[in-house]
Image (cartoon, rainbow, N blue to C red):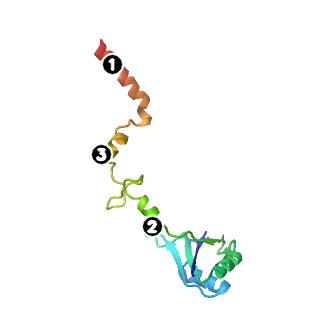
Amino acid sequence: MSVRLYVGNLPKEIEREELEALFTQEVGETESTKVVTDRKTGKCRGFGFVTVKTEEQADQVIEKLNGHVFKENALKIEKALPKAKDSQEAAGPGNGSPRRSKKGRPSAPSTFGDGYASAAQPDPRWAQELEKLKEMLMAQSNG
């Protein structure tokens, strides 16, 4: 059974081949190597993943390379958490996460249906001013 490892604190200018070469040199053959890059710049976001064949090989990699200084960065290596399909579905619209528009920006909150009560709440930054206005209106209607 293959084991996926998280590799953190990678330098921004690393290439996938360099990371693969480091792991191959230290622990032998790996199944796959991935460096996570920024879409705009194409540079490494500081982490990646390496998949090894066995649990024993994963433990060996962690023991040898966790804290290993690579291009002036001390690598952080640990077993990656499994991808959870349920957590992605739970984070969908209506469960607390903002919906994304086509341009990647959060869309405006809905003021209808279930979201109406939360949208009608006053902004806490103006709560004191709102109380003053309410008092003034009550005084006018009573006077």
Label 3's element? helix
Residue wearing tag 3:
113
Q: Quadrant of residue 63?
A: bottom right
Dot 2, crowdedness within 10 Å: few (<14), some or many (≥20)? Answer: few
Res. 24 in view: yes
Q: Is residue 134 left or right of residue 21?
A: left
Q: Is residue 109 left or right of residue 88?
A: left
Residue visible at 46% across and 70% down in the picture: 41
Dot label at residue 138: 1
Q: Is residue 90 left or right of residue 55?
A: left
Percent from the top left, x then y, of residue 8? 60, 69
Percent from the top left, x then y, of residue 22? 63, 82
Residue visible at 58% across and 72% down in the picture: 6
Q: Quadrant of the N terminus?
A: bottom right
Labelled pair 1, 3 in contact (Cβ < 8 Å): no
Percent from the top left, x then y, of residue 99? 36, 56
Q: Residue furthest top?
A: 143
Task: Say whether disc 2 or disc 1 marks the residue closer to the N-terminus.
Answer: 2
Label 1's element? helix
Residue visible at 64% across and 87% down in the picture: 28
Q: Nearer the viewer, mark 2 or mark 1?
A: 2
